[in-house]
Each structure stands twice: as C-alpha cells, then as structure tokens.
Image (cartoon, helix red, strand yellow):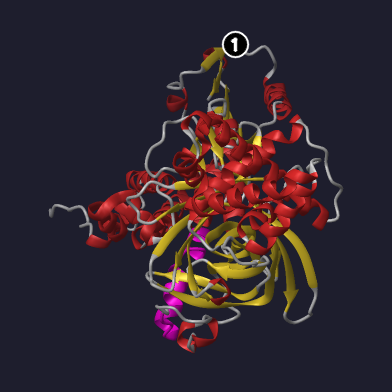
Amino acid sequence: MTQRTAPRVGFMDDLIELLSSMRFAISLLTILAIASIIGTVVPQDQSADDYLRQFGQFWNPVFSWVGLYAVYNSGWFIAILAFLVLSTTLCIIRQFTPMLREMRSFREHAREASLRHFSHRASLEPTLPPEKRSAAAVAYIIGAGFRFRIDEREDSTLIAAKKGSLNHIGYFLAHGAIVLICLGGLLDSNLPLALQMSLYGKTPVTGKKTFAEVPASGRLEPGNWSFRGNIYIPEGMASGNAMVYVDNGILLQPLPFTVELKRFHIDYYESGMAKRYASDVVITDNRSKEVFERTLEVNKPFEHRGITLYQGGYDDSAPLLNLTVHGMSASEHPAFPIERKVGESIPLDSTGGHTLEITGFSSVNVENLTAPNKKPNRTSFLGSGSRGAENVRNLGPLYTYILRDPAGQAREYINYMNPVMIAGRPYLISGVRTSQTDDISWLRIPLDDDGSVETWFSIRQSFFVPERRAALVERFISHTSKKDEQESLKTVAGHVLTLFTKGGLEAIEHFSETNVPEDKREEANMVFIQALQNLAWEAWMMAREAAGKSVLEPNEYYAPYIRDVFFALTANLRYGAPFYLQLTDYKQATILQATRSPGKPLVYLGSLLLVLGVFAMLYTRERRLFVLFKKRRSTGGDVVRS
C-alpha cells in the first residue's frame, strides 16, 4: 500500500496567500497612515528655496530624494496604493465563495450531538401534541423575524432559522470601499501623468519660457482626463493654461476656458496670519463664449467642464507696484506716478540721472513695537511714542529699493505703505542706510487731518525751493502788524530759512555761537525756532489755499502737526534722496489650482460604502436558532439556540 502525500504548495500559492493575508493589508495600511501623517506635517509642493531654508543643506536633499515634499504623488506611495488594491481584491476573491456559501446556508443538517455543544441551549418537555409543535415553533420564528428551513428526519424534526446575514455583506462593502478609494487615489495621482509622458513622449520644460515658447512635447492634450496644475494670474491679467509641475520642470495643460483675475483680496490678523483671501475672477468658455463671474475662496471652489478651480494661494514676491514719485530736491518737481515690478531697474532722468532698483516687497510685516531696538533696526522710528502700543502689530506692506546717483553711489530705502500710528498720530515711515551694516535713519512724514501726505510735501517745497521760499517769506512778513519791522523781519526770516535748508538746526546753532553774544544766545535761538515754526504754519496755509481749502486760525489743536512737520523737515536733511517713493497700490498674483479628478466619484462612492459596511458589521449581528423536536416521547424535545 503506497502512502499518500500532501500536495506541494507552489511559489504562486505562497505569494497569493501572502498578498491576500490580513497581516499584509494591515502592514500596508500602517505605512499609508504614517505617510499621511508626514504629508500633513511637512508642507507639500512648496518651492525648493523654502525647503532649503526649513531643513538645511544636509536634510533637504535627503527628504527630497525620499519624496517627502510630494508624498501623495511619490512612487513608493503610489506603489503602496497599488499593492493595497491588489491585496484587498485578492482577499475579496478568496472570501467571496465561502462567505456566500455561509450566507446562504441554514445548517439544517446539523447533528444533535453538535447542537448539544452550543453554550446557549435549553431542553424542554413538550406540552403541545406532536402535530402542533412545528406550527407553533414556526409561528414564533416568523414573528421574531427569522427565515427558516425544516429538516424532517426519521426520529426528529429540525427547524433551522437565521437572521442578520447582512453582517457578511458589510465585509464586502468595507473591503470594496477600500479598493474604490485606493483606485480613486491612483487615478488622481501622478500615475496617469507618468503614463502619458512615457507613451506620448511628453517632456517637462525647464528654464524661463513664455507659454508661446513651450514646444508640443511640453504640452498635454486639451482633453487630458486626469491632471492637477496651478494657474498663476496677476491682477488684471488672464490665463488659459495650467502648469503641471514635474520634478524640476513643468508641463503645460491647456484649459477649455480662460480665467481673468479682476481683484485679489487678502485680510490679515494683527499677528500677520492670513484671515481670508479670495479671487474675483471672470471665466470665459472657449467654445460657447459663456461668461461666469465668481469669487473663489478657500473651500469654495468652482467647477466647469469637469475641471474644478480652487483658491490655492497667492504670490506677492514680485507684484506690480503703483508708485508716486514726490520731489525732495531744491528744484520744483511735481509728483508723478510710475508702475513697476519688483526686481526692475529703471533710470529716472527727471531726478538728475538717478537709477531706481526696486529690490523687495512684503505684504505682511509683523513687528514687536515695544521691544528694544535691535538690528535690523526697523522699530527705531517708533521712539518713545510706542511705549503704550500693543506688543505685536502687522504694519502692512513694506517695500525696499536702491537709489544710485550718477556716480554709482547707492543708498537703500525701506518704506512702509500704510500709515503707522505713533503716540496717536499717523505717519508715513521711510528709512535709509548706505550699507547693510549701518543703522537705519528714519524719516517720519506726518499726515494731515485728511490723511494726506501731500500737505507735508507742499510745505517742504516752500522751505527748500528758492522761488517758493521767497513767496513764503513775503507771506510771513505781510502778517506782521508793525510795518517798520517788516524789512528786518524779512532779512531774519530769509536768513533763518537759508541756514535751516542747508544745515538744519545745527547750522542755526552754529550761527548763534559765532554771531550772537553768549548772554543773548538762548533768546536768539528761541526766536529763530519760533520763526521757523511760524514759517511752517504759513507754508501750510499756502498749501491749503493752493488746494482750494479755507485758511485756519492758529490754535493749540494744530500745534502737534506743526511740530511734526518741523521735525520731519529736520530729518529730511539726513534723508539724502532727490525724491520719495510712495506706494499707493500694488497688484498681486493669485494661484488657482485646476484639477480634473476622475477618481473623485470613486472616492466618494467608496467612502459611502465604507460607512455602510462598518455599520453593517458593527450593528448587524447574525443570529441562528435551531429547534429540534424528538419523535420519541421518552427523550422529550430539545430547543437549541445559537
């Protein structure tokens, strides 16, 4: 007699057993959970410079090589999703037939011996006659919601009943949901893009190129069924292409519509954190020419022709600046507007051959206004007036530029766009330094009651432009009541103005030290200062008359403004610039995300099935009931429930 041996299990059987095992699926889910945590903690799809600053020279290339900067599109993440789909599908296939058989089976052929091993069982003496026992049991079973089958045997009758078989359907729903969600993730990942690149020869474009210069190999098909790209649109401009980033280059994805950015809105908290940003856009369909006006916000997308537009972010690194150039030389230079982008270098011939280089812009600048001065010395302009200010405040947009004179000497200027409140009064702040190592000297230009800076510039021209200075002196002496003193007052006022415009208060003090007796020096200085303040008042009234406003009567209410004007005129001598650049407006660029996601319906359906499956497994219990009637009276009847 030959001995029978167990059939040999091949490699494929072992592999299928491994892939469809629960331990393998749990391992994949654990890795996916860890990867998702990393993708949440580490900012995704940022610029290379941001990652370099954040992680340094050593870890940055390591994290980049591992793919932590684009976790959800990395090759290993997609591979894990694919293996999870395969594992779950094999598990469903293996369990389908046995579980379906279990769902359909009533176990009506169960033996009496096996029934007696159930933990929940009872043996009862029958009280009904044999012909009524089965009918009574069946009536009870139906009333309790069970389905049943009856097995008539030689010595007994077995009624096998069950309910709650949907518990097994929950297993298929939950596992099928995992497959659908993973398939949706694969469809919306970079896998379709990689297939297009390999099958159709698409090559990412590197370097700076306009959209028109992108070759056909760098353009995806207009009917591309899966993509995720960014649309970069400055204010007032339009775009009909999305940029799909691939490694260090981009592929251009044409859209079936154009998007025009009318206005970009952004609001901040005092801490400088963005509170809300939104884009007012006009979307024009290329085929039907239908126009849609929408405001896109975070979590408020817009969908058209299967493409969803999201508010992704914004870019203020190189906006278009609207600037007003105010003259600050000894010549008459009316203000004029210019419009330039950050990074541009332009000549300003009207200011004596100077060259302007706009070097930087930042829309958010949070400063600790009560902290001691420290380099970079941006808070020194606040002075003692900041003692009662809040610790942290967003001072708004800050722009920097370099001004080069014809000899090539450069000075850096740091200006704030919005007025800064100091001791309850508003000022426009501008700083200057000749090198990065120098402290910043600040000019605080006061705003008048109308919130305008034009008044100060008009007063300044009355002081520093010779023609207007002569008219100022004439107006000043015309208001003196003593006619015989007008000529001498005219001489004193003209001389004081000339000294002040050349050297400030230091020049006046030097004049007093060399020309006024020591016992009368203090009184003379007070006279000179009072004359300068009166001249500043008269210059203000001249500015109001030129603007068509009424002349004011001197009182204590206007004294702080005149004092601020006088201090700013003094600081102006150290400013060293032929003009002042005032930022009146700037145009930012919005970053919209355009996606066509064929996997999104699968993910939604999978999520629904997952919820239903979990509820079916947790809240639907399978119950079985067996009723065995013995035909022999001596042994009685057994009722066994499971």
* Residue kind at label 1, given as amino acid type: Glu
Q: Residue 527 in the image: x percent, y percent?
A: 62, 36
Magenta highlight on residue 187? yes
Q: Nearer the viewer, residue 400 or 12?
A: 400
Front residue of 546 and 508: 508
Q: Is residue 396 above or below residue 527?
A: below
Q: Is any part of residue 120 visible from this angle? A: yes
Viewer-side residue, 502 vs 171: 502
Asked where in the image residue 404 lies, by quadrant, the reply is bottom left
Q: Residue 85, located in which quarter of the rendered image?
A: bottom left
Q: Position of residue 346 (x, y in %)?
A: 51, 74
Residue 619 x, y percent position in the rendering: 59, 31
Q: Which residues are magenta?
A: 183-203
Instruction: Count how many numbered circles sit on residues in the image.
Output: 1
Q: Is residue 118 magenta?
A: no
- Magenta stretch, main secondary structure, is helix
Residue at left offset 67%, top offset 77%: 256
Q: Position of residue 148 (x, y in %)?
A: 64, 35
- Specify few, some or many for label 1: CA neighbours under 10 Å numbering under 14, 14-19, or 20 or more: few
Q: Residue at x 57, y 35 (%)?
A: 524
Which residue is disc 1 drawn over?
125
Q: Does residue 438 appear left or right of residue 62 in this picture?
A: right
Q: Is residue 617 visible?
A: no
